Every structure is written in C-alpha cells, then in structure tokens.
Image (cartoon, coloured by chain):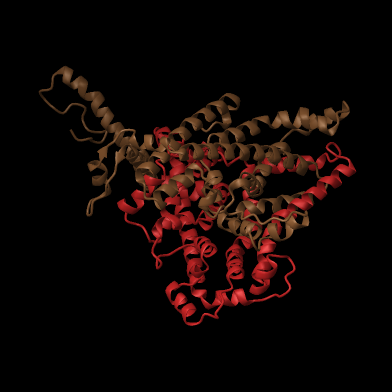
Chain colours: A brown, B red
Amino acid sequence: MTPQSPASPPIQKAGATAAEAAAEIPKRNAASRVLLHFRKFGAFYIMMAPTIVFLIVNNYIPMIGSLIAFKNIKFAYGETLVQSFLRSEWVGFENFEFLFRTTDSWIITRNTVLYNAVFIFLNTVIGIAFAIMFNAMRNRLLAKFHQTMMFLPFFLSMVIVSYLVYAFLQPELGLLNRVILPFFGIDNTTDWYSDPTWWPVILPIINTWKNIGYYAVIYLAAIIGIDKEYYEAAMIDGASRWRQIRVITIPLIRPVIIVMVMLQIGRIFYSDFGLFFQVTRNSGALYETTLVIDTYVYQSFIGAGDIGMSSAAGLYQAAVGFVLVLLANWVIRRISRNDALF
Amino acid sequence: MSQFQAAVRRRADIPAVQRISGPANTAINIFFAIYTLLCVFPLVVVLIASFTDERTILVEGYSLMPEVWSLEAYRFLLKDWWAVVDSYVVSIVVTVVGTVVGLAMMSMYAYPISRQDFPFRNVFAFFLFFTILFNGGLVPFYLVYTQGLHLQNTLAVLILPLLVNGFFVLLIRTFFANTIPKELFESAKIDGAGEWRIFTQIVLPLSLPALATVGLFTTLNYWNDWFLSLLFINDTDAPVTIQFRMYKTLLDIQYLSANASAYSAILAANPNFTIPGETARMAMAVVGIGPIIFAYPFFQRYFVHGLTVGAIKG
C-alpha cells in the first residue's frame, strides 16, 4: 500500500470484505496523517537535521561508547572503532574494581566534592554580600564601574589566569615570596608548585576571584527585582538596614539562592578542568590536594594511556553526576516549579 | 530586559528609601575600590613584567617598579612573529566559523521545539536535554573524534565539539516560545509564508537579544578554548589556538618559536645567546590578553543583560 493523497477512493480492492475494508480505513488515515504531518512540518526536520546528526555523533555515540568501561578494549591495525569495540571482550566491573582499589579513587572523589562544596559556599555568601553592597551604594555610576571591573576575571581564559597566578607564585621571582610575604615579615621560600599544603586555600581564592562577578550580578538582579514597598513599610516601622536585609532581602531572594545552589550541587562531581589543570600547572607533586576526577581521567588516559581505568572513572563521574542532577532538579521543582530544568 | 530596566527606573524614583548611612556608604566604597584593584592588579603585574629587562627580573623578581625597563621581550617575540600570528589566525577562524555555524544550528533546532503546534516538540526537546544530563565522558568522546572520524590535527576538530550547547538551545527555545506571539505564525501562514520564511524573516529578527547573548557566550567559549588543542593536536605543524600556544609557552619558552629544532640549533651554536625567558612569557600573555580587554566592555554589557533577563536557564 502506498500512501496516496487524501482524495483517492476509500476502498480500492473490489473483493475486500466489509471487515477488511473497516480495517483499511484507519490504516489509510494513519498513512495520510503521516503525509500531512510531513507536508506541514517537513521544514522542521530539515532545520533540526544538522543538530540531530551532531548530537548523535558528539553525544549519543560517546554515551554508548562509555560501555567501554566494561570492556578490555584492544585496537588492531586497520580496524574501525566500531569493530574494535565489538571485538573486545567484556570484563564486567573489573576496571571499576581496579579503580576503587587505588587510593586515587578516594583522593579524587574527596578533592572534587570538597573543593566544590567550598566553591559553592563562597560563591553564594560572597556573591550575596557583594550584591547587597552594590545595591546599597549611593553612587550608581560608581557601583556600575566596580561591577564591571569585578566581572573582568570571568572573561579571562584559564591559561591567562595561570599566567597571573604564576607571576605571584613563581618561587624565586614571584610577588608572593619576593614582596608580599616579606612585607608582612615572613621570610618564605616555599616552592608553591611542589608543596601541596596551601592549594586548598589558593584554589578557592582564585575560583572566587574569577567567578564572583557572575554570581554577584545574578543576585543583584534578584535584589533589584524586589518591590520597594516592602522597604518603605519596614522604614516606617523603624527597621534598621541590617534588619531589612535579614527579614526582607534574604527571604525574598531565597528562591534564586536555592536554585543557584542546587544547580551547582547538581554539578558537584564535575570540576573546572582549567582551574585544576592550568593553574596548578598540572604539577604532579601537588596531586594529593589538586587532583580531581576530571584531571584524573585526562591524566590516566592521555598521560598513562590507561583506557580501562580512565573510562571507568569517567563513567563513575557521569553516573553519580546524573543522579545528582536529577536530585537537584527534584529539589528545585519542589521550591520553584518555573526554575526547574525539567 | 524591559523588566530589568523598569526595575532600575523604579529604584531611581524612590531614592530615599534604601539610603544607608554616610559612613557605611564610605566603607562600602573603600571596600570595592580595593577589590577592583585586586581584579586589575595581576594584569598590571604581568604587563609591567613584560616591559622589564630580563636580568632585572631575575635579580629583583616581579615588581611594579623595575629598575631597568626593556622592550627586549617584544623584540624577541617579533623574531618569530609568524608563530604568534599563525595561532591568532587559527583562533579567529575557529571563533568566527564556530559561532556563526553554531548559532545557526542552535536556533534552527530551537525553533521547532518552541512551536506549540509541533506534535513531537517534546521528543526532540528531550533528545537534546538528555545530552545535558548525561555524557559519555572524555574517553569515548576522544575516541570518536580520533579513531572514528580521524580528525586529530585538523582545524575541524577545534570547531566541531563546541558547536551546539544544550543549555544555549534551551535558552533560545524559551525566548522564542515566550516572546513571539502565536498569532504571528497564523497570520504569516495565511499570507502564504512557508516555515523557512517565517523563521528567517519573522522569528530571527525578533530574537536578536537572545541570539546576541548566546552568540557572545559561544564566542567566548571558542576564543578561550585551549582544551581541544590540548586533546587533539599533537603534531607541531597542526593548527593550535593562541590560548594553547600561551599554555605551551608558559611550560616551555621554546614553544614561542615556530621551529623548535632550528631554535635549539641557534642555542647550540651560540651559547651566549640568552632567551628572555620570564619576560618573553609575560609578553606572550599580554599579546594573548589584548583582544579580550578591548572587547570586554562591549561583552560584559550584553552578558549582564543576558544574565538579568533570567535567560541563562532554559
């Protein structure tokens, strides 16, 4: 049966029984509905085609490919990727067992989650504090100026940030050991790029410095959106500025705060690769306090060529990350339906 | 955006309400003055270091007031200007092509899933959305581009992976769905316009704010990218972005040169030839930072707009 135009006669076969004819009608309707659909929306499929192809190649094939973590992959010369994948033997959870038997798995999980927890805390608290202070500044022009300058680091690539940090931390020539610490009377010769002690302090400072402009702007927009009548009423009742912040500003921007925090918690298993790779100059001596899941996957894959271990770590990250995103979204949904991702 | 502007105007009308005391205002002003300095200070340090005499920096360390100034670092960069210009061109090509193609693809995908009368809009929205929730990780991603598509050491591999970003598509979709009235589609269709015509002549022109925001984000993603070069480029003759060259230069000053082996040969022949290591690195940083600083005021205005529309989330 070929799908005809809707104008073709309803019954074609002369010998068709009544029952057959009755069955034929919905089928033909279905066919013409498909035709109608494509006549109406065909252009849509052509528009979406490039991105569909892109997503299949760039995202969905790698998703299936992540099953490589359950295989002992071997590449043979002249073989395509699919052939190698199919030919390699399944090894179950062997790669994961190897991964979790190393101390690395604990270190990278701890580092990733703890750093992110600190980042989330600082982004939120300092972001809100800055936003409140911006909002309170009398000189709007000056507030705008400071806001603009604070946003600057957000636009710099991590490579540039690593240069800036290098100028401070270079052990013999850097500003920190040469100028800043001596100024405070501390004679220091720490080689920052090989001593892991201080990185749990250094990295949060850099991360906050780089990203705080973004969070301050988001919270500032929320504060500006608050109806001024609340503050007028509070003034009349004699509430101090501190009290206004506590009982009006913070409660009214709480949905924004919760959404922002949950979005970050949803990604607590992922880290800013550039921050941990570039700024630390990927120094092996620092790994104990600077290696996170993302850099570990890169290091064990590109550096050590260990496909099994790195793909297991990658899938571990993706799976836990997936659960966390769902959880975070569930929480957001309960608080503010409109802000949920889905 | 209009909501934001209205809010700004509203606050200007009632100046007295949220007034804080003079001393508090002064304290906040001083605080932000210091913080702004902290944002600019590291850049100034690098800038000054790039104009410092190499020997001075080796003796004095980095400082704001070096004893001897010098242009030697830039002269050194100029000797091998081709390497720098080359990766600059790569960065520009990657950024322009990636942003234009990416923006076209993303808005062409966003439009159908924004249309209420398209029956499968949720299917295709989910198809996109799932890529935000879950990803296969670095290893299979790398294998697809290298073993599968054999794109290592090509310009294409620096562009392709960043073309479509799920968040951005959802952002454009939301903008389409919320700002373009349904009646507009109806009347356009009655007038005989096809979907392509509606899309290019009605939808896109009405959506410039959203497209500008996403376009700027995409531009920044491409311009600041060094990860794709790190991952996929391992041949010295292959194209690398300026960010990646900066990264390599910080690790190894010889990477400044387009031809590392010739460079070592010069060193071997003339041991007295000193490389302005520290200062040349910083000069390289200045050369790399340059365009961002100039584009920055323009960028940040649209960014703040985009963020305050609340458009950032899908």
Q: Residue at x 60, y 62 (%)?
A: B289
- Point out residue A155 in the picture as x, y percentages from the top left corner: 61, 54
Kindly give the residue lying farthest to the left in the view shown. Answer: A15
Q: Write down the quadrant of residue B23 in the picture.
A: top right
The mark tally for this picture is 0
The quadrant in which the N terminus of chain A is found is top left
Q: Residue at x 57, y 64 (%)?
A: B288
Q: Residue at x 49, y 50 (%)?
A: B201
Q: Residue at x 59, y 50 (%)?
A: A195
- Point out residue A232 in the picture as x, y percentages from the top left corner: 83, 31
Q: Is residue A142 above or below residue B281?
A: above
- Judging depth in this view, the residue of A205 and A86 nearest the camera is A205
- Judging depth in this view, the residue of B48 and B162 nearest the camera is B48
Q: Is residue A303 left or right of residue A331?
A: left
Kindly give the residue lying farthest to the top in the view shown. Answer: A19
- Judging depth in this view, the residue of A88 and B101 nearest the camera is A88
- Point out residue A190 in the picture as x, y percentages from the top left corner: 64, 54
- Judging depth in this view, the residue of A117 and B271 nearest the camera is B271
Q: Is residue A208 above or below residue A241?
A: below
Q: Write down the quadrant of residue A45 in the picture.
A: top left
- Point out residue B312 in the picture as x, y percentages from the top left corner: 57, 42
**Residue B277 seen in this snapshot:** yes
Q: Is residue A269 above or below residue A195?
A: above
**Residue A46 seen in this snapshot:** no
Q: Write down the quadrant of residue B57 in the picture.
A: bottom right
